[in-house]
Amino acid sequence: PFDMERLEGRTVGIVGYGDIGRAVASRLRPLGVEILALRRRPGLSAEDPLLKETLPPERVAELMARADDVVVAAPLTPETQGLVGREAIAAMKRTAVLVNVGRGPVVDETALVEALEQGRIRGAALDVFETEPLPAGHALWRLPNVLLSPHCADNVPGWVDEAMRVFLRQLERFRRGEPLQDVVDKAAGY
């Protein structure tokens, strides 16, 4: 069991302010949350009404220190691997919770486990890990201040039908010679 707290008045840092990060922000902002975002190109979010401030990746430790809670939604690229490292985790408030729904290797898992074991942060909710599936006997399994879930948030009733609808829309676009939507930029890694 976890004690719940109101989000109103808290500051949430979002590491990785792409589609998923924006979706998180759009759900948090109406609850009275101030949002700090970390993104590779901070200028792209300058006029975003959901955000209090946008910071570049080199200021990740500052974002972690200012946030009451942190949501990691960054893709895994050479630039993001280990982005939330030992220094950034050490900068977090003792009362903070780290949520990772992006990719496991973006967070230094060893440093996170140490912070959790030593009570230097309140907790973590993790949907992704450095090694997936999370190995039996891993320290995260035994920590009482961690909420674990398999990386399957889309596994809800109707997800297969929705995936098929998306595929069929793309197929129709392809047949008409139109540009496809949501194409992965192989150079960017997402």
Image (spheres, rainbow, N blue to C red):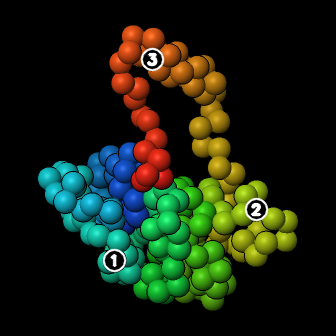
State the quadrant of the N terminus: bottom right
- Graded by Cα atoms within 10 Å as few (under 14), some (14 to 19) or many (20 or more), the crowding at tag 3 reads few
Tell which circle, 1 or 2, labels the residue nearer the N-terminal end.
1
Q: Secondary structure at mark 3?
A: helix
Residue drawn at x 54%, y 21% as measured from the top left: 167
> Residue 93, image x and y in percent?
43, 82
- CA–CA distance between discs 3 and 2? 38 Å
**Residue 143 lies in what quarter of the image?**
bottom right
In the picture of the structure, the residue carrying the numbered disc 3 is 174
- Graded by Cα atoms within 10 Å as few (under 14), some (14 to 19) or many (20 or more), the crowding at tag 2 reads some
The answer, for residue 115, to whether it is visible in the render is yes
> Residue 87, image x and y in percent?
47, 86
Tell which circle, 3 or 2, labels the residue nearer the N-terminal end.
2
The numbered disc on residue 134 is 2
Q: Is residue 98 above or below residue 167?
A: below
Q: Amino acid at mark 3?
A: Phe
Q: Amino acid at mark 1?
A: Glu
The numbered disc on residue 37 is none
Label 3 with label 1: CB-CB less than 8 Å: no
Outermost residue to the right = 136
- CA–CA distance between discs 3 and 1? 39 Å
> Residue 21, image x and y in percent?
39, 52
The answer, for residue 9, to whether it is visible in the render is no
Which mark is nearer the camera, 3 or 1? 3
Residue drawn at x 54%, y 55% as measured from the top left: 101
Which mark is nearer the camera, 1 or 2? 1
Question: On the picture, is 127 further left or further right than 138?
Answer: left
In the picture of the structure, the residue carrying the numbered disc 1 is 58
> Residue 5, image x and y in percent?
46, 64
Q: Secondary structure at mark 2?
A: loop
